[in-house]
Amino acid sequence: MLCLPYLVSSAQNREATSPLLLANPEAQPGRERLRHLVIGSPEGVRGAINQLHVLNYADQMTWSQLITIPRSGILITPEQGEVFSLLRRDRQLM
């Protein structure tokens, strides 16, 4: 249910043709920057963002705008040694 841009790349010094490049700039000492992706319907994505806000995990204003995933799909280019985990969860429609 996370919003995912056309291309998510954390590769430094690499050009991307995406309207949104989620780069991993210099991390603050003692901290690691994580990238959260919510993929789903616009209503579902907004709902998940709102729930994370209510839980005081992430302010709604820190998320990117919603970006439509093209028919060709999306490409994720990780840094060496990065891993990926996906949680699939159903949301009750109102």
Image (cartoon, helix red, strand yellow):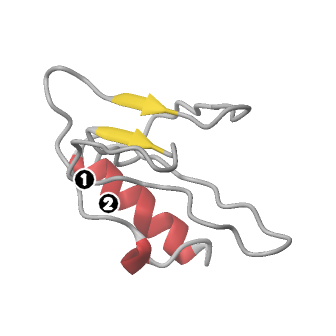
Total number of numbered labels? 2
Residue depicted at x 53% and y 52% = 36
Residue depicted at x 65% and y 61% = 33
Kind of residue indicated by mark 1: Glu
Q: Residues within 10 Å of mark 1 (few under 14, many from 20)?
A: few
Q: Position of residue 5 (x, y in %)?
A: 30, 45
**Residue 81 appears in the rendering:** yes
Residue at label 1?
Answer: 43
Q: Nearer the viewer, residue 47 or 18?
A: 18
Image quarter (top left, top right, bottom left or bottom right) of the N terminus: top left
In the rendered image, the residue lying farthest to the top is 72
Please say if 2 is above or below 30.
above
Residue 7 position by quadrant: top left
Please say if 61 is above or below 65.
below
Kind of residue indicated by mark 2: Arg
Residue 72 position by quadrant: top left
Q: Mark 1: which secondary structure?
A: helix
Q: Nearer the viewer, residue 83 or 42?
A: 83
Q: Position of residue 23 (x, y in %)?
A: 47, 55
Q: Position of residue 65 (x, y in %)?
A: 24, 64
Residue depicted at x 46% and y 46% = 37
Residue depicted at x 43% and y 75% = 62
Answer with left or right where residue 61 lies relative to residue 78.
Answer: left
Q: Are marks 1 and 2 in contact (CB under 8 Å)?
A: yes
In the rendered image, the residue lying farthest to the right is 30
Answer with left or right where residue 83 lies relative to residue 53.
Answer: right
Q: Residues within 10 Å of mark 2 (few under 14, many from 20)?
A: some
Q: CA distance from mark 1 to mark 2?
A: 5 Å
Residue at label 2?
Answer: 46
